[in-house]
Each structure stands twice: as C-alpha cells, then as structure tokens.
Amino acid sequence: DFDEEVGETKSVNLEKISSDDDPPLPSPSEWDASQLAVKGENESLSDITRMSFSDKSIVLCNSSDSKEKWKCALRKYENDTSKLETVDESEFSSRSSKSSGAVFEEKPTSHDWDDGSDKSKTTRSYNSVLAFARKVDEEEGESKDIYPAFKYYPRTRLPFYQACSVRILSIITLTLIAVCVSLVVVLAIKLSQGEPIVVISESDTPTLSPTSLRDKSGVREVIEANVIKRNATFETLKYDDPRVFAMDWLLYDDPRQLDAFDDNLAQRYSLAVVAFSFDSMAWMHCGNDGDVDSNSSLCSGKDFHEFIDEEKYTWLSGVDECDWYGVTCLEGVVIGLELGRNNLVGEIPPEIAGLEYLKILSLHQNCIYGTIPSELGALSHLEQLDLYKNGLSGMIPNDLFEVTSLMQINVAYQYWNTHNCTRSDGTIAEMQYARADPVNDYNDGLKGEIFGDNIAKLRNLRQIRVDDNSFYGEIAPAIGNLRQLVILSGGNNLFSGTLPNELTRLTTLQELVLGQSHLSGPIPDKIGELESLAALKSIYNIS
C-alpha cells in the first residue's frame, strides 16, 4: 500500500469494535497490512496514516471528537514481538488539533550496538514498525495502548544480496556460464579427437520472405485506412492489382521514401495508382507533344514547351509529384490532373478520390472504359470534369450530383466512339466496343437520368455536355434553377417528354443542343426571348 522509495501516502479508515479487555497483540505471522481496529463504541479515532520516506517513517493519528485525548505512537521491534521499543509518541486532543504525529528516524545512532560492532559503519535493521493509537484517561492520569489500533509495516528494502530479483539474475547468469563452458569443453574434445564440426549452411534451412524496415514503417497501414476504397485490403487484393503495384513502388522503388506521417503520402500514392491503372507509353513520356531527357526525366522538346511554360518531369520519377507532367499543385497540394490525349487505356481507379482537393480532372480523348467511380462524389472541391471521347459505360453515379462545386461537366461522345489507342504490348484498344474489346458488343455509353430533379443541386454549373450517350428520362423543370448555365448540350440520347417552360428562365444560356434526342412536343414560346441564346438553331430533328 506504500512505496518506501518515493514516499507514497496511504490513509486507512478504522473499523470500530467494542470490547472491555485489550485483545492480545497478534503474532507477526497473523499481522496483515490492512488490519486496523479501534476499541470502544464511543471512541472516535478515525484513521492512522503512515508516510514512509527513504530515511524516516511518520505516523499521523486523526480524531473527530473534540472531547477525547489520544497519543499517537510509533514502535519498533527486532525479532521478539514482546520486546517493543517506543520510538516516538505524541499526545494530542482534537480541541486544538485533530491530528498528532510520531517520527521514526531510520538513521545511524551514536550508541554502541549489542553486538559490539562499529557504530559508524552500521545501522540497526528493524524487522517492522508498529503504529499505535493510545487513549488518554484524564481522570486516572493514565494512557492505555489500544492494541487493535495498529498497522503492520514490514521493511521492504532488503539488503542487495537478499533481493529476489538479484538472486534470480544470479541463477540465470550462472546457468548461462555453465552452458557456455560445457559447449567449449565439448568443442575442444571433438577437435582433439579429429571429429569434423558440422556447420549448417543457409541452404539447409527454409527461409522466410524478406521483411524490410519499410514493411514495418506503417505506410501500408496508413494508405489502407485512408486511401484504399470499397473495403479492399492489401491482403485481399490480387498481386497484379494496380493498387498493389503502387504500394510496392511507394515502399521500395520511390526515391523519396516517404514515411507514414508525411503530408504528401496519400496524394503521391493516389497518383501512383493512376499511373499503374492506365496502360500507356505516351503519358509516361510527357504525352504526345513531348520528349524526355534520359539523364534527368525532364520533359523536353519544342512541341511540349509550346503548351507548357514550366519544367515538368515524367511520372514516378524521384521529383515531387507536383512536378510530374499533367499535375497542377497549389502550395504542395494537387488541385489539377490534366492528361487529355495521352492514349491512356484502362479504368478510372476509385483511389483517385484520394486527391481530395482536386479542382480539375481532365482525362478526355483517351481510351478509358468502365464506369465513372462513385467515389468522385467525395471530391467536394471539384469544378471541372472532362471525360469526353472515351469509352465509358454504365450509370451516371448519383453521388456526382452532390459535388455542388461543379462548374463544368463534359462526358460527351462515349457511344460509338471510333477513337483507338495502342497498348504497350502493341495491341489496339477499340473504343467502339464495350471495354475496348471487339469480342464484346458495341458500347452504349453512359446511362441514367442526367437531367432529372438532381440536376438542380448543381447550382454553380456553367456547362454540361452529354451528347452521344444513352441518357434517358424527361428534362425536369428543376433545370430552370441553373441560373448560371451557359451551355446545355445533350444531342443523340434517349430522352422523353417535352422541353420544360422553365428553360426560359436560363437568361445566361448561349447554346442549347438537344437534337436527335427523342423529345416531342412544342418548343416553349418564350425561348426566343433569351437574348444571350446564340445556338438555338442546333435544336433539330426533335421527334
């Protein structure tokens, strides 16, 4: 309950008992650190507190009754409990003070010891110290020990050679010495008898897969917890998954060797996933308009610098990812990814959403197939989405309508797109077919109710181009809430119904293209009053 080295204090409440006779003092074997009691029903000794320090023990007795007098005593003994020696005692009354104390100085004294030893070199070692409370009888002028009101404090600091930990350590040390001596003896005997010593080589035992410090750096766990999408884990992903390739590159091949706490870890990994998701030679070499300095990975070439006026490097090079071709940053944070016309072949990875501050995502005129990942709905800063002239298919994700910062959407020309790309193995990706593979049917493009009620959530929208897809449904009156809309182009789709009158509320509209979209009915009368409208003639062949 206490620590003699640091002087921890422990208070113990007393339990009252009633007895006319003083109980005998228990033998040491019966003493317990929690054994406390006070005799008498009307007596009010409330607790005994002992504080132990490196060189002294202090005991305090407390009383709650102002009419009674007490003595607080500290006694010590050696081996015989019948020979108790009072160390200190102090009389007190709660009339003036509610506590009294006694001090046991555990220091060498100046008197001769019974064993005749040198007084200046040794200190008597008492086995225990007892704290007593003594009731003072004012009428008889006597004080009487109340033996149950004690606490047993065994001395805890043994001599060094008696400490249990030292004994255990000594046994272990001696055992190890004995084993080493035995091995040396056996080896000497074998050598003296000319027997060969067998050495086990590395090839004789199975080896485990190598584990580097990078594997234990926490990078994998941070990426798995914050970037990997759709509940995937590195344990469940296939070995040829782009996310696995990106992690291996980040851990072992990336010259920057980012740690788990680096602010750029998530965006660098997300970009690496993009790199491994798309099969292309051109974009790894600064696109179709550039060349690469083989010594520095720097993008060069006359054509390249006609479009880009700053130094850029190839992807997965050792420079900061903000300096990679097609990446735009603001204060070290990726805000733009512009890789149009780079012969990218593959699917948009959900982990692209790891670029959480992305404002521009431009992947137009490539050979991208599959669906638009719903995770794009988490890009709350996205303003421009350009995916036109690819081979995308499937439903437009509803999450996309939650990105209220969007100002431009261009997903046109996914259906019957005849643009092709050459893969790194020399095969051709033909985008007019589903998933760019001629064994599949023709690609139908994107589907869904692009102009349904959800469109009203995109209040900042300036342009929306969805031509040549398979969008369906009516154009909802809610489209009239897009008061900043300049271009609405959705020709060659599968819409139904009529043009809503609410279109006439779009006073900033300059271009309206909805030809060959299976619409019916009359054109709203007041659409001619839109003074800014310049491309009304593009509405043709409305069925």
Image (tube, rainbow, N blue to C red):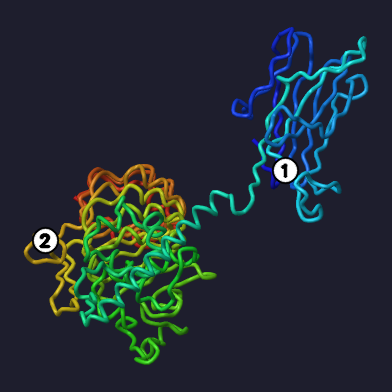
Query: Residue placed farthest to the left in the image?
Result: 439
Image point 35% across, 68% down: which residue? 182
x, y percent for residue 373: 30, 55
Q: Is residue 440 left or right of residue 23?
A: left
Distance in Å between CA atoms under marks 1 and 2: 85 Å
Q: Dots 1 and 2: beta carbons under 8 Å? A: no
Residue 47, image x and y in percent?
A: 75, 24
Question: Which residue type does callout 1 highlight?
Answer: Gly
Q: Residues within 10 Å of mark 1 (few under 14, many from 20)?
A: some
> Is residue 523 placed above or below 291 in the rendered structure?
above
Placement of the N terminus among the 4 image quadrants = top right
Q: Which comes sooner in the sequence, label 1 or label 2?
A: 1
Residue 270 visible in the displayed image: no
Task: Identify whether 474 is placed above or below 25.
Answer: below
Mark yes or no: residue 129 visible: yes
Local SS, label 2: loop
| Image position, residue 530 (x, y; %) | 42, 54
The kind of residue on which mark 2 rests is: Tyr
Instruction: Determine the residue positioned at 30% across, 55% down.
Output: 233
**Location of residue 190 with respect to 473 vertically, above or below:** below
| Closer to the camera in the image, 436 or 281 | 281
Q: Foreground residue, 217 or 453?
A: 217
The nearer-to-camera label among 1 and 2 is 1
Say which residue label 2 marks: 442
Mark number for residue 268? none
Q: Check disc 1 and report the residue beneath it.
A: 7
Q: Secondary structure at mark 1?
A: loop
| Front residue (pair 172, 292) | 172
